Structure formats: C-alpha cells, structure tokens
Image (spheres, grey):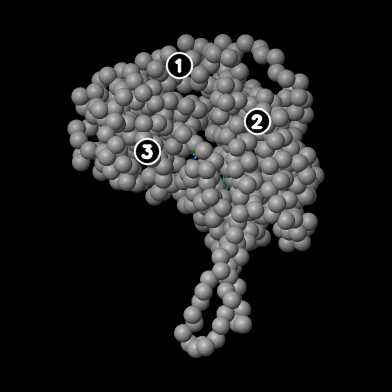
Amino acid sequence: MGIAVSPIQIDSCVSDFIGKPRKMLIDGKWVNAASGKTFPTYNPATGEVLAQVAEGDRADIDAAVKAARKAFDSGPWSRLTASERGKLVWKLADLLEQHLEEFATLETLDNGKPLTVARGADVPLAVDMFRYMAGWATKLEGTTIPISVPYTPGAQYHAYTLREPVGVVGQIIPWNFPLLMAAWKLAPALASGCTVVLKPAEQTPLTALRLGELIMEAGFPDGVVNIVPGYGETAGAALAAHDLVDKIAFTGSTEVGRLIVHAATGNLKKVSLELGGKSPNVVFQDADLDAAIAGSASAIFFNQGQCCCAGSRLYVERPVFDRVVEGVAAKAKKIRVGSGLEPDTSMGPLVSEEQLQRVCNYLDIGLSEGATALTGGKKVGGKGYFVEPTVLVNTKDNMRVVQEEIFGPVVTAIPFDDPEELMPRANDTVYGLAAGIWTRDISKAHRLASAMRAGTVWINCYNIFDAALPFGGYKQSGWGREMGKDALELYTQTKAVCTRL
Ligand code: NAP
Ligand code: MG
C-alpha cells in the first residue's frame, strides 16, 4: 500500500510564512543565528523540506537568556500589575483563536497530524490554556500566618507570604504537540510573571515561531519571550546549563530528561520534567465494550501514537479478550492513513524518518520476540513517514515491546484473569504517566484508580485533557505537574516576610 499525496492549495499566509527562512526571536527582534546557520524542517507527509529556520546555538541562547534576565530584573514587565499581565495573556489567546486555521495548517504541514485534529484539538486547547492561565495572574496570593515564636515570649509579629515568579525560565519542548506544548509551558510562566527562553523541537519549530509574532503583536515587552530554534545537543543543552536561568521546564524523552537534570546541577536551577510513558489501559468484561473498544483504539492511535500518555499496553479480562482485541484491530483497519491535509485522513505520518525507523525497529523486535501482528506491523511504502496502525498479540510481560516506549501506533494486547493479578503487572514499568480503566463497577474503578501508580487515571474515557486538570508523571515519567493550578507551583516561589510589631 502506498500513500497518494495530492497537491493541496494552502492559504497564502501559510505559504508566505514558510516561503522565507524563519528567524529567531531575541529581545523583541527577529534575528538570524549568530553563526548565520539555518536548518531545514520537513513535511513528514512527503519527506520534502518545508522551510529553513535559523539554527540557534550557545551564542544565541546566551543572548536570549540575557534579554530574558534584563526583562525580568529591570524591564517594564517587572512593573506590570497582575491584571495587566493577565490581559496580555488573554489577548494572546484571542489572537491565536483569530488565526486558528493558519496555525492548524502550519502544524499539519510541520508535524504531519490530521488537519481535523490540529483544528479541533491542538489549537483550541492552546487557546484555552492561555485563557485559563490569564485568569490566574490576579489570583496568585500569599497568606497571613499567626506565628508564636516560643523563644521571644511576649513579642508580637505580623507574618505573611508573598508568591513571586521564579525568574528566567528555559523551556524545551517536543514535536508531538508543538503549539500545545508551547502553550502548556508559556501560559503559566507568563501568568506568574516569569520571562522565558523557549526552544522548540528541531522537527517542528514553525508554530512556536508564528506564535512569537503574535506574542509581539499582543504587546508583551521585549525580552519577556525569546524563541530560539535549534538542536537539542547545542541550543537545548546550553539553555539547560545556563547559569542565569532560574528554572528549566522540559518535555520529551526520559533519556534526555536525565541529561537536563545533570545540566541543571551547575547553578542548581529548579527543574520540572514531563517524560515518557508506557500506560496500561485495562478493559473488564463488565465494561460497555463498544465504548471500551473505540476508546482503546483511540487511546493508542490518536496522534499516530506519538503521545506520552498513549494507552500502549492494553490489558483485557480473558473472557472478552478476543472480542475486544478483534474490535480494536477492526478499528485499526478502518483508519485512513494519509497526508494530514486530506479531509478524510484519520492518521497522518510519523514526525520524521528517524521516528519511522524507531517504530519499524520495534515492530521487528516484537515479531522476532514472538509477538504476532493481528493487524498492521509494517511501514507504508512510498513517500513520507507512514506506518500501519498495529495490534500485537501473543506478547509476554518481559518483551521489549511491552516494556519500552515505542511512541508510535503500536499496541500490545495482553489478557488477564483477575484484578489481584492485574495490578502488579499494570504497575510493572519504570513509567507512571497515565492509565485507563473500563468497567461499569464504580467501586472497582475507584479502587484501581487509587492503586495505579500514574499521574492521570481515566475511567471509561481516555485522552481527556483540560487546562484545569493537572497532568504529569509518577516514577520516571517526570517531576511536577503541568496545567491546572498545580502548574503555577512550577513558576512561583514563596517568600516569608516577618515583622516585629
Ligand atoms: P527528545 O530528544 O527528548 O527531544 C525533546 C526536546 O529536547 C527537543 O526540543 C530536543 O531538541 C531537546 N533535546 C534533545 N537533546 C537535548 C539535550 N542534550 N539537552 C537539552 N535538550 C535536548 O525526544 P525526541 O528525540 O524528539 O524523541 C525521542 C523519544 O522521546 C520518542 O520516541 C519518545 O519516546 C520520547 N518523546 C516523548 C515525548 C513526551 O511528550 N513525553 C515527546 C517527544 C518524544 P531537538 O530534538 O530539537 O534536537
Ligand atoms: Mg517538520
């Protein structure tokens, strides 16, 4: 099977944007890399170069961090009221919403995901994230605290806390939800009063750069947001190690997460990490099986399986194993794999040649370890980085395809006999990002939700995200929570003030 990619007319604002080399945003100005270098970003549906982008490295990161430092320490940003800050973040949301179609198209071109998904999920969720966090700007409060101080008998004190921005924040984001990850990171940082240097993923820098233009249009002062595209080993590593950065926020692989922690030790900057997953999705025989089948298919196949929380280990109670797994395989067969720009595409290409190789390598490993593909199992021929949605059966708990994050549309289906036996197996992973449970028995559902070692548990649903709902990992899936009011903890710090009366 090959993929036919028909030429599609794209809006002129998008073709203008990708038509010239994109610069980086430092101190309110669009500039070339100090080295003058650029790098290509590709359209994964065709494998062709989509645009050229300025290649930031240590020198550009240094300039960006110094601009963010100045903006935080002495720029107009430091004197804005909380309400003015909130209004700017809200205005950014409005601008993004006005350009929804343009951002959705740009995201589909750069990342590959179906336009329907970019338009229906990525961009609206990013808009909502900015709006949600805009409201928090005026609600970051301290407390007054009655203190007793036993060693100063008779003395009276007035003690209170201030909640202050943490300072200059470095943010490093991945390619699977490029705009949305930028929003998850920027929105709480800006609402809190921090300044930012953002490094988008090398595979997908375009929507972050276009967002930078809207950030300047909204009226954020120079240097508050700096956007430096470039490679992880150069630009990313320099940002993580920079001594003038107070905090680094990272989303990506667990392996690079470890490098970030090491790099941060120089000045002991604060670190938050949102890393990989190998999430169990559990279907009981008493579930609404039609809903469980549809939900389990979407849990793994959404976004080409390139989700850190993908339901990649499907555990099914034995009496309904065949029905559920065949149902998920039937859904997989119906998925229309194609260019994200085609209106009837439900699964686009993987993001890159490298990611395609990685997923195909795991398929080979799984099959050679004795697993069987009930459906899928192969690369899709022709141009672009397409792979078949795949259901693997005859797997064993210790197989690499059951233990390691594949980050592609590949689910391993595994039968179980009772909850006692299931729970240790479901938790038998170094990760702890998410889990799914499908049952009509509410006591069982909540008992298991409590037993799952995961930062998010979905009951009778999967991949439900909201700006108000915290998201993050147990175990090696990360440190800290994004979204919700928990995210503000990452970008603020508490100062205790004590006055003797
Ligand atoms: P990655 O290497 O962890 O990349 C994530 C971000 O970190 C990118 O911006 C990357 O830059 C940057 N980076 C890479 N090396 C760095 C370093 N030494 N110091 C600082 N920053 C660095 O992820 P990937 O290579 O794109 O994907 C590999 C695997 O990671 C995937 O197959 C998947 O398992 C996992 N992943 C997880 C998530 C998630 O949401 N949790 C997202 C994406 C990938 P450049 O890539 O631009 O060089
Ligand atoms: Mg690209």
Please tell me which residue lies in front, 119 or 469: 469
437 or 474, nearer to the observer: 437
Q: Nearer the observer, disc 1 or disc 3?
A: 3
Q: Quadrant of the C terminus?
A: bottom right
**Residue for point 78% across, 49% down:** 222
The residues tagged by marks 1 and 2 sit, at their Cα atoms, a distance apart of 27 Å
Disc on the earlier residue, 1 or 2? 2
At 20% from the left edge and 35% from the top edge, which residue is drawn? 418
Q: Where is residue 474 drawn, in percent x and y?
A: 40, 49
Mark 1 — residue?
335
| Above-or-below relation of 7 to 87 | above
Say which amino acid is labelled 1: Ile
The amino acid pointed to by label 2 is Thr
- Give the answer, above or below, for where 280 lies relative to 59: above
Q: Quadrant of residue 218?
A: top right
Local secondary structure at mark 2: strand
Q: Secondary structure at mark 1?
A: loop
Instruction: First in sequence, mark 1 or 3: give its number.
Output: 1
Q: Residue at x 48, y 45 (%)?
A: 470
Which residue is denoted by mark 2 in the rendering?
41
